[in-house]
Amino acid sequence: MIILLFAISFASAQNTKALDSLIEQYELGKVEGDNLPILKQIAEKLQNPERKKKYADLLIQEAAKDTNYLYLISGYLQKGHAFQLKGDYADALEAYFKSRDLSVKSDDDLGVGAATISIANTYAMSGNFKTANDYYDNGIESLRKIGDSVRIATALQNAGDFAFKAGFYDEALEYLEESKEIFSRKNFQLGLAYSIGTIGMVYADQNKEELARENMNQAIGMLEEQKQYYPISEFLMSFSNIYAKQDELDLAISYANRSLILAKEYNLKDQISEANLQLSELYKQKANYQSAYEYYRDHIKFRDSITNVGAVQEMARIRTDNEIARKQVEIDLMEQQRRTQKFIGIATAVALLSIIIIAIGLYRRNKYINKTKKIIENERNRSDKLLLNILPEETARELKFAGRVKSKKFEMVSVLFADIVGFTKISETFSPEDLVKKVDNYFSKFDQLMEKYSLEKIKTMGDCYMCAGGLPFPSKEHAVNIVLVAFEMMDYMHEMRRRNEELYNFHLRIGINSGPVVAGVVGSKKFSYDIWGDTVNIASRMESSSEMDKINVSANTYELIKDDFDCEYRGEIEVKNKGSMRMYYVKAIKNKTLLNDLKARIGKKELLKESG
């Protein structure tokens, strides 16, 4: 991802000699007075991750001697940036949370905003888009209140890049154009280059090659002048993708190689992994299987160092422990207050030597304890009910008694994505209130279907509904049940159109895939049950490769349902980042028992097309 780090000076990377001079002054002991300002400048300006971390640690050590919050906050922020550049996301989060806690403690609103956006960046880079979105919203809101336009533009740039990676191109361009306008107005050339280049990457994904080349070439030129090589590596990969689409494989390989060289020079693990994967795919297309294998092997090595399940669990642990630490401080303060009140009460009782007053005090205390117990019990019951609304029962029970939930791997589940076709265009014809009401009507019905078929709703993303079968309890019928749900979804959409086509002219596009996933809970205040893995990504691709009113399944799912459903083979279809994949449209239910059962469930004699 093209993440623009906070606390980058306007002049950073524009004057290498000035930076070298600062380092020389410090290393030779020529600094007059306090070392903190010069260490802060060096840590902010350095782009090499290892050197950046070295000077960030020195800044933290010096600032800790006098508990200087301003420089401690900056030191931990820059330390997080160094880990983020290296792809060590769990360590980056730990540093960012430390910077944010110190900012809260010292009432530094600007520091809170900067750390919050950096936390959002890290979750986005690790693929945890839902958590990232929450932090982006909070961070941008904080910065708008302060009115720091450059930091607002930086946050908008990063949110735009996150939206682009998630496939929300309109939202991405909206964020990026606003950040570009602010950077241009402030003459912040580094931020302007990031925004222009990322806009080019959006155009590349939209197959607007000319606009993509124009924007990315302009950005690369600006970044080379400032010796900023981290984003250039990813822009070069976008060029490689453009030429690969045009079957100009030699040019595509050339750009991917340039990207890999830069990424290795600056130890950028994420870019090293992506460049190796791209080169592996390109050499495979040229039938050079030895080179393809070698690059793929290197891709796996760097990918696993960034995205392994252990790292995901560690990131969740850091976030949870951070929130727990805050709560512990509150509890300690309450405990101290309680002890003080108890001491005053005892001292007063002894001074008055009044058995009657002591008795009254004990009575009132007992009454207060009983009342408090009742309040706590009611709140506990309320919390349990709320938890069951957002987490599976088994998962909620584990969270309640263990305090955290271990991530689990499920060897075989089925994942469904359902998307409303042409939602953006449809939304223009309704008021916001009416639109939300209509979408809620559909999704509430889908929620009922989840209970009926013992499936698990994962989340909704705008006009997209995601669910899974086979978890948290494994089931042999997960694939069949999720296809039956798809039929009921389609049937409900058809029924609503039949009742009032003018008000409910909505159509679905559905994609399903089956395979292994990792499931777990993210969040500390707002819990969310989520799943990860290639199975989820392929299910999403099945949905985007489907057509209106169609149920598109992968070969994995087809093998599980072919005895119960009539399916139409679509052939091998090209899928972004996955190559060619076999796909099938589910046409009808051929298992008579299943068909009759489904008709009975929904109370209809006719459903969709029936197999003879």
Image (cartoon, rainbow, N blue to C red):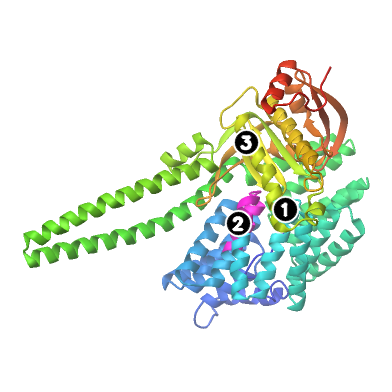
Front residue of this view, candidates 590 and 282: 590
Which dot, 2 or 1, sits closer to the camera?
1
Task: Check if mark 3's residue and mark 1's residue have beta carbons within 8 Å.
Answer: no
State which region is magenta.
116-134
Quarter of the image holding residue 535?
top right
Q: Secondary structure at mark 3?
A: helix
Question: Is 97 located above or below residue 309 in the figure?
Answer: below
Question: Is 434 located above or below residue 25 in the figure?
Answer: above
Q: Residue at x 78, y 67 (%)?
A: 177
The image shows residue 481 at horizontal and vertical percentages of 67, 27
Task: Check if mark 2's residue and mark 1's residue have beta carbons within 8 Å.
Answer: no
Front residue of this view, candidates 202 and 506: 506
Which corner quadrant holds the C terminus? top right
Identity of the amino acid at label 1? Leu
Numbered badge on residue 435 = 1
The image shows residue 213 at horizontal and vertical percentages of 89, 60
For disc 2, the marked residue is 134
Numbered badge on residue 448 = 3
Q: Is residue 126 magenta?
A: yes
Q: Residue at x 17, y 63 (%)?
A: 345
Q: Residues within 10 Å of mark 3 (few under 14, many from 20)?
A: few
Front residue of this view, candidates 152 and 432: 432
